[in-house]
Amino acid sequence: MSVASSIKITVVTDKAKISPVNAKDRPFPLEWTRNIGIAAHIDAGKTTTTERILFYSGAVHKMGEVHEGTTVTDWMEQERERGITITAAAISCAWNASWGPWKGIKQRINIIDTPGHVDFTAEVERSLRVLDGAVAVFCAVAGVQPQSETVWRQANKYKVPRVAFINKMDRTGADFFRAVSEMREKLKANAHPIFLPIGKEENFSGLIDLVQNVAYSFEEDPSDQLGMNPKTMPIPADLVALTAEYRTKLIEAVCDYDDVIAEKYLNGEEISVPELMLGVRKATISLQFTGVIPGSAFKKKGVQRLLDCVVNYLPSPIDVPPMQGLDSDGKTVEAVVDDKGKMAGLAFKLWNDPFVGRLVFFRVYTGTLPKGMSLYNPRTRRTERVSRLVLMRAIEREEIDLAYSGDICAVVGVKEVITGDTLCDEDFDIRLEPPSFPEPVISMSIEPNSKADQEKMGIALQRLVAEDPTLRVKTDQDTGQIILAGMGELHLDIIRDRMKREFKVEATSGKPQIAYRETVHGSAEGEGKFIRQSGGKGQYGHVCIKLEPNGKGKGIEVINDIVGGSIPKEFIKPATEGIMEGCNNGVVAGFPVVDVIIHLTDGSFHEVDSSELAFKMAGIFAFKDAMKKAKPALLEPIMGVEVTTPEEYQGDLMGDINRRRGQIQSLENKAGACIINAHVPLEMLFGYVTDIRSLSKGRASAGITPSHFEQVPNSLLAKIVESSSKAPART
């Protein structure tokens, strides 16, 4: 039996037999709905691709350009000034596929355009959590880049089926087949072309559809200057053999997911176009196959065919397994997509709109959500009323009265909601799995310039932290300074800029601080006693532990090895809480401790004087005592750096990496450029992008992604320990 035998597919080859779920009640039936994300490395062309999709689908009447700051989805001032996507933007369009079972039926496509910069990876994370499918965009010249790998892993994590769009086929050095090969090697993807390019670089002139076995020409038609209707044409004679070869490879790949195709192929029978289309769709939804389409979004080539693939191959909300959650007893509950079911959905993003107030971006998984409905939040155990419902058009809003299962909308009126909250009917006990977010890697101090700014800054930070799960705010106990922690220099720079523009807060920022970690390299035992006697009832707590290293990335584990009741059961929890609190501040420089195992081995108690507070304090003391003896070490974050540069600057840039304590991992020549992969400490990367532009006269670029933690060299340890209390703020 094939892998696809358990996959539910709603495609039928006879249009007349399509029976939409609740069609009479819905503007767009579930089968005719696609919730997709556009995700890729920075500068691969996501926003341009989205802009072309909106134009060809009729959602906008003029194509915007990133370099002109006129795109629909990049609506923030900072996005238009910098030419990058900072926040994920949701927008909808409709597409009438040019072929397939849905030809002549407009499909609703809800699109989320996500950022490509690593500093805003949380936007990709939470978007993929609520999407049914994705378009992964790759550059035909650069191939698979560092952030491409990150978003691919995120899509794997949330089990999101995807198709790949190899963009920029018109650029010098473009190589479609090399990009597909890199997808297989670097991403371990089962990637197969479903279209072949006709020509490349300046000669990129058409596509060959391997499923239909037809070719499309991009030759300009004087009556069709926008390329709205690419012409079909015979497959070029010099590509007939290549087309036959890759169509056979495609059929062989699909055989694993479709028993009908496998049987026909083994018997040497002809496989029809509808059968092959259905096979590709099954394979894609199985998560073990990725169809690849070449194109050039900027030159308006291949976008319509990409839209056909979104409709024909990516799943509708009822094609993917039901979202699972837990009830109050920890049992698994399913949110089955059904308009007539009890309502449940996930709040995946918060945004403060200057006109309507707080917007909660919401994916409805089951049931319907009418305006005015009261929603129950299992986390807060409170009910809140939805005052307004809107569909988002990037920054614009469209008021609606009812949202259906499978819809992505925004809710106005609910207040005590954070990212990842489930909102549901009061009698539907379910908590859906929230998205997870990485820990911050960099921080800086920030001080208001006046008392008026101080009041406004508190409100601004509260709202910004609610919007952004990767932004953390705390007050340094030693200096009294407010510390902002985030994912990178650009992330913190954008936050500071938003405080000034949106909240009118004038503030002075300090030098960014590194989020170091501490761990141990040896095993040791520790003892903690908390004894206070002040005339009346005293305090007594006594805890003994054994501390040892854990595997990299395994985190902190506390194991209760108490036997014989030396610590009563009611004091085990506070003792454990004390140990965990001790892990927040290590003994080397006061940074959080990671990757350790703590065994609670022994202790003692007093029948009258023992208390939860005493055992919590004893747990803290025991941890500090053990860590001092267990060869403590300070760890620094190491970043993966990929530099793309013309070969003449290779030596200068490699020398610069060595000066920054970096380690070169690999060198690769690709399309006349040199790609340097290295590991460099984050501390040495402040201002790095600006520096390499200076060294290469603006011709080199760099991608920086978090890699791992390594021990700080002894020669730098004293300096870091000395400066671990944050320096005074400065501009």
Image (cartoon, grey):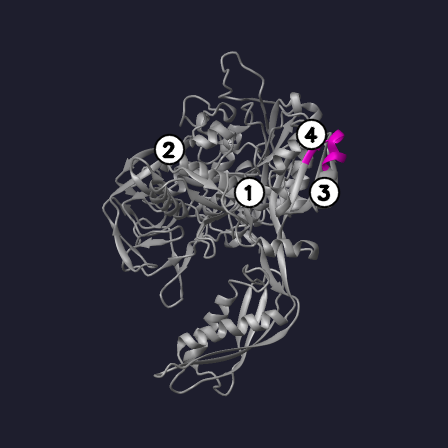
Residue 651 location, quadrant:
top right
Q: Which residue is mark 3?
A: 659
The CA span between labels 4 and 3 is: 17 Å
Nearer to us in this view, 60 or 625: 625
Q: Which residue is mark 1?
A: 118
Characterize the magenta stretch by its predominant secondary structure: helix
Point out the tag, 2 or 3, that comes first from the N-terminus: 2
In this picture, is 717 found above or below 110? below
Camera-side residue of 671 and 94: 671
* Element class at badge 1: helix
Distance of label 2 from label 3 (alpha carbons): 44 Å
Q: Position of residue 112 (x, y in %)?
A: 45, 38
Q: Position of residue 705 (x, y in %)?
A: 60, 45
Density class for disc 1 (Cα within 10 Å; few <14, some 14-19, many ≥20) is many
Q: CA distance from mark 2 to mark 1?
A: 23 Å
Q: What's the CA distance linking mark 1 and mark 3?
A: 24 Å
Mark 3 is on which residue type?
Answer: Arg
* Residue 328 relative to residue 640: left or right: left
Residue 379 in view, yes or no: yes
Q: Amino acid at mark 1?
A: Val
Is 401 in front, or is 199?
A: 401
Residue type at numbered disc 4: Ser
Mark 2 in CB contact with mark 1 (< 8 angstroms): no
**Image height check: is 561 above or below 17?**
below
